[in-house]
Image (tube, grey):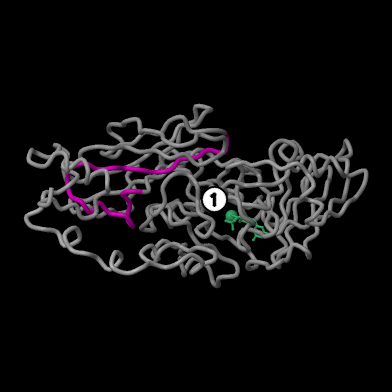
């Protein structure tokens, strides 16, 4: 046992290798046999020869400094300035299905507003029996629900329409987060005001400087929309719309109005800026598709990927990624190693929830040759994620929004990966 070195391997790997000592290691060889003593094992280390931090060194805990590269990032040339801009979730650093609050991508059109709970008001007006104004304290007296949902900006992958452009899934797919929301059902709030029978639409308005407004059909509003105030158990972050935002499960992120201040009930859609000149898809003939609210099924391999190369050489290799659909769950994801010639079903793991992110894995023995990695999601309606060529055949090349095409990582023999397009 004292001859074994297990740098960077797990404790389980250590124990298993320990059991194999004296004999051959497993064929997959995930733990290495050392040539000499490993000081990390044989010598007393600083963390064992002095006391560590006491409690309360960080009243609100932050990740250990060795993880300081795990951050949201923006792409500076994308927008003129940061108040109307976007940054991206580091998908390649995450696992499971929950996005930690501090890593949820941000999209603001007028910067992140800072509103105290005591200054927050929610007005309901228009075609209602009784126009009402709720305070935050009023909101807390409605029955609460907890739901895990993804929020994807319709522009996620927009830079990739014409071809591969950004080198990393953080930038090509990172306009998404998946958290547990605690809030109240929108239908309960609306019932309090009493929606008139001719009230078929809702205008949701934000309190921030952008005056973000979107029309939402009443059917959706009464189905599964929420006014959320907590994410992953704690109050919403300022960036995500503190103290309350609209949650519109499965639908494009732009409709999830942050810093929600007003809900107007009407008999027709308002056709606001963000639902006409923005967030619509321009087709080949120059006309625009109207109302593309639902986010179609999509997936991406997060590891390996351009920001997360294979560093261990040939042998046992874990491929992982995420998949989601605005229409339900993801019962299946297929993975190809050769650019779509042959596909294998990935192993789904973790909770499979409606309109939530799903985690998949594909474990294989890499022979060290180059790979053309792709993943393809199939959702619970049977819809199959298209290739980018299939998407362009239907939508043309003028689009920006709603790109759910299959992405390709070209993994080279040295383990590095590049964003390429082959189909
Ligand atoms: N009030 C307000 N709500 C808003 C926005 C905004 O700028 N102001 N941006 C929208 C867009 S385009 C998206 S994609 C999501 C982003 O949510 P996030 O910042 O929590 O990721 O919020 C939406 N809601
Ligand atoms: Mo967005």
- Residue drawn at x 16%, y 42% as measured from the top left: 29
Q: Position of residue 59 (x, y in %)?
A: 54, 66
Question: Is residue 116 rendered to the left or right of residue 169?
Answer: right
Q: Quadrant of residue 327?
A: top right
Is residue 52 or residue 283 the one in the foreground? 52
Is residue 80 or residue 35 the one in the foreground? 35
Toward the bottom, the furthest residue is 81
For disc 1, the marked residue is 401
**For the residue carrying disc 1, how many other residues have a C-alpha within 10 Å: few (<14), some (14-19), or many (20+)?**
many
Is residue 308 in the magenta section? yes
Toward the right, the furthest residue is 129
- Residue drawn at x 36%, y 33% as measured from the top left: 347
Question: Is residue 5 rendered to the left or right of residue 274?
Answer: left
Q: Which residues are magenta?
A: 303-327
- Residue drawn at x 64%, y 56% as measured from the top left: 235
Q: Position of residue 378 (x, y in %)?
A: 45, 32
Q: Helix, strand, or loop for circle 1?
A: loop
Is residue 399 in the magenta section? no
Question: Is residue 4 rendered to the left or right of residue 174?
Answer: left
- Quadrant field for ligand 1: bottom right
Q: Position of residue 341 (x, y in %)?
A: 27, 33
Toward the top, the furthest residue is 382
């Amino acid at each position: 046992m004292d001859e074994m070195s297990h740098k960077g391997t797990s404790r389980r790997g250590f124990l298993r290798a320990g059991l194999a000592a004296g004999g051959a290691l497993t064929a997959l060889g995930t733990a290495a046999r050392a040539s000499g003593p490993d000081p990390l094992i044989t010598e007393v280390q600083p963390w064992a020869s002095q006391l560590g931090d006491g409690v309360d060194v960080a009243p609100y805990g932050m990740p250990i400094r060795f993880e300081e590269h795990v951050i949201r990032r923006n792409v500076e040339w994308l927008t003129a300035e940061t108040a109307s801009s976007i940054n991206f979730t580091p998908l390649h650093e995450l696992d499971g299905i929950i996005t930690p609050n501090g890593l949820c991508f941000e999209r603001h059109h007028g910067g992140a507003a800072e509103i105290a709970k005591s200054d927050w008001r929610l007005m309901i007006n228009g075609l209602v029996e009784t126009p009402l104004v709720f305070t935050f304290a009023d909101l807390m007296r409605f029955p609460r629900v907890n739901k895990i949902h993804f929020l994807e900006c319709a522009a996620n992958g927009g830079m990739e329409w014409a071809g591969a452009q950004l080198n990393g899934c953080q930038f090509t797919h990172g306009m998404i987060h998946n958290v547990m929301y605690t809030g109240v059902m929108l239908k309960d709030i609306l019932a309090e005001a009493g929606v008139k029978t001719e009230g078929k639409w809702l205008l949701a308005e934000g309190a921030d400087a952008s005056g973000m407004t979107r029309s939402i059909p009443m059917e959706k509003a009464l189905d599964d929309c929420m006014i959320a105030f907590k994410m992953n158990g704690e109050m919403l972050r300022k960036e995500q719309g503190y103290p309350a935002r609209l949650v519109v499960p499965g639908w494009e992120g732009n409709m999830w109005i942050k810093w929600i201040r007003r809900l107007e009930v009407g008999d027709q859609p308002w056709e606001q800026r963000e639902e006409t000149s923005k967030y619509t898809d321009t087709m080949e003939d120059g006309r625009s598709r109207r109302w593309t609210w639902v986010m179609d099924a999509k997936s991406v391999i997060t590891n390996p990927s351009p920001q997360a190369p294979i560093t261990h050489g040939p042998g046992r290799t874990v491929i992982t990624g995420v998949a989601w659909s605005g229409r339900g769950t993801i019962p299946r994801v297929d993975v190809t190693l050769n650019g779509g010639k042959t596909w294998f079903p990935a192993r789904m793991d973790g909770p499979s929830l409606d309109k939530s992110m799903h985690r998949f894995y594909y474990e294989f023995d890499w022979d060290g040759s180059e790979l053309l990695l792709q993943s393809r999601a199939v959702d619970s309606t049977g819809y199959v994620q298209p290739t980018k060529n299939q998407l362009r055949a239907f939508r043309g090349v003028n689009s920006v929004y709603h790109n759910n095409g299959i992405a390709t990582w070209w993994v080279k023999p040295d383990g590095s990966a590049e964003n390429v397009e082959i189909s």
